[in-house]
Amino acid sequence: MIEEYIEYWGLTQRPFHLAPDSRMMCITGQYFECFERLKYAINTGKGGALIVSEDAGLGKTTLLLKLINDMKERYGDAFRHAFIDHPTLNSVQMIAQITSSITGMTVGEDKLKNLTLLKNALIEAKEQGGKSIIVVDEGQMLCDAADILQELRILINITHNNEYLHTFILSGQRALWHTIKGMPEFWQRLPVRYYFVPLKAEETKELVQHRLKKAGAVESRDIFDDDALEIIHKYSKGSPRTVIALADLSLLVGYTNFANKIGFKEVSKAMSAMSGQGESLPYVKEDQEPEKGPALSSVSFVERGSKKSRKHLNYSEASLNTTPMVDRDMKTVHERPVFIAIAIILCLITGAAGYYMASGPFTEKRETVKETIQKIQKAPEAPSVQGKEGAFDIEALKDESIKKEVSEAIPADRGEESSKVLNISNQGKRAIVVAYAGNIRSAPGINYPRIAIIFQDEKINIFDEKFAQDGSKWYKILLYGDKEGWISGSVIDVQ
């Protein structure tokens, strides 16, 4: 029996189970290349392979389990394997566990006897036309265990008729790569190597869609919109494990809110839950206070209903695309007010647009302003028109061509006063977002509406700075070319 939130999305099984599941593995990109290299190592008898990832959670274990399952299907009983996923053993225990896995027998701790049993079982598999592999996962735990690594190195030397009897695969995180490279005698025995890096945005999208399809999602229905997938990618920083965890929690949030699709709001709430922040968005500390203006992620919530009434909801595909919710016991139909539905649609569309524009590069318009300012500074009359705090009176410029260029560079919606004066007191200052994410507001202060979100490590140009009424410092930046926004100094590092 699967959970109700899985049924709600029209799925037949859990798409985002955190435990390694080779059936859900998306073999594309770097995973396809690594998978092919491993099969090459096994089929050509190369002896050993080294698989390393930049960080934890990039899918090494799942890929290795996929490899084992494929070998089982191809060679049947003639395939032997050992998979050691907790390698903090001494050399005797290590050999005993490998021998037990390959032979299928319960063995003691006589190392010499176990090595003999192991070699005989490997020869038997080879004579049957099969293959054998020995996998040691989480190899970074052996970086300080030189004796165990040497034992594993010697294990590769089990040969028969001048051929390796098995393929030894050592897998782990970044530290393992440097450790093995510092052991030339071991490095040379692992000629097939692959290094995993975090997923790109397109790979994250492909991973989520692949798992949904495997779980029974209807191909014509997009459960996650593009903005939701982009936020998931940025939050996860390309880690498949985090992608899977956040996507699964987003499905649950969407279920509790009776959503028809996972979008900006659902992923934001899931991020908050994963960050331990409850219902609030974990972007800036000041946001723990209530807002006076509406935020892009603020939408009306539908009453979740009792456990009893939820069990009587029709979770068919048709019901997911309609707003009325039917309680079969009460024989009544509860319709959401039209204005709530309209508000949700407008908020999601605006939020998606705001996020997309804020997360992208600050475009050509900003560069135009910067180049124009440089021209003003070089103009002969610059000192005479420069006012307090670096502001220039545009009307006082004598060069008509520069005046026209400045006027065109300044956004028309800044008002009459600001259209005549260009404040460049902070031009040239740069900042980087140091918090995981930061809210960009329409004016300096947490009580002003949020108009966009910017994520950690993104670099921004600063054009002005002010203190809010509560004494906090805020900086003005340009969004998507010409829109002004303000970001709290608590979430950025001014360079």
Image (tube, rainbow, N blue to C red):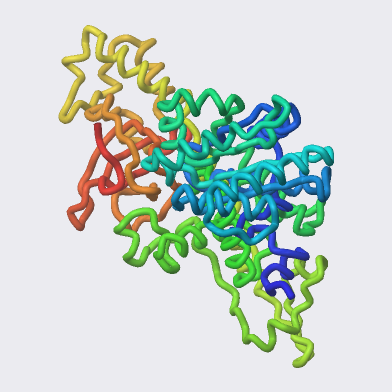
Residue 32 visible (yes or no): no
152 left or right, relative to 459: right
* Viewer can see residue 329: yes
Percent of width and height locating residue 91: 47, 47
In this picture, residue 387 sits left or right of residue 212: left
Task: Farthest residue to the top: give it.
Answer: 380
Q: Is residue 429 above or below residue 271?
A: above
Q: Quadrant of the C terminus?
A: top left
Residue placed most toward the observer, 122 or 186: 122
Q: Residue 345 location in percent, x, y?
A: 63, 58
Whole-percent x and y of residue 44? 73, 27
The location of residue 279, given as percent across then percent down, is 45, 68
The quarter holding residue 126 reads: top right
Q: Which residue sits at x=36%, y=41%? A: 144
Q: Is residue 426 above or below residue 401?
A: below
In this orientation, which residue lies closer to the viewer: 482 or 268? 268
Q: Residue at x 62, y 83 (%)?
A: 305
Front-most of residues 108 and 445: 108
Please report the residue visible at 63 percent of the width from the left and 43 percent of the height from the top.
134
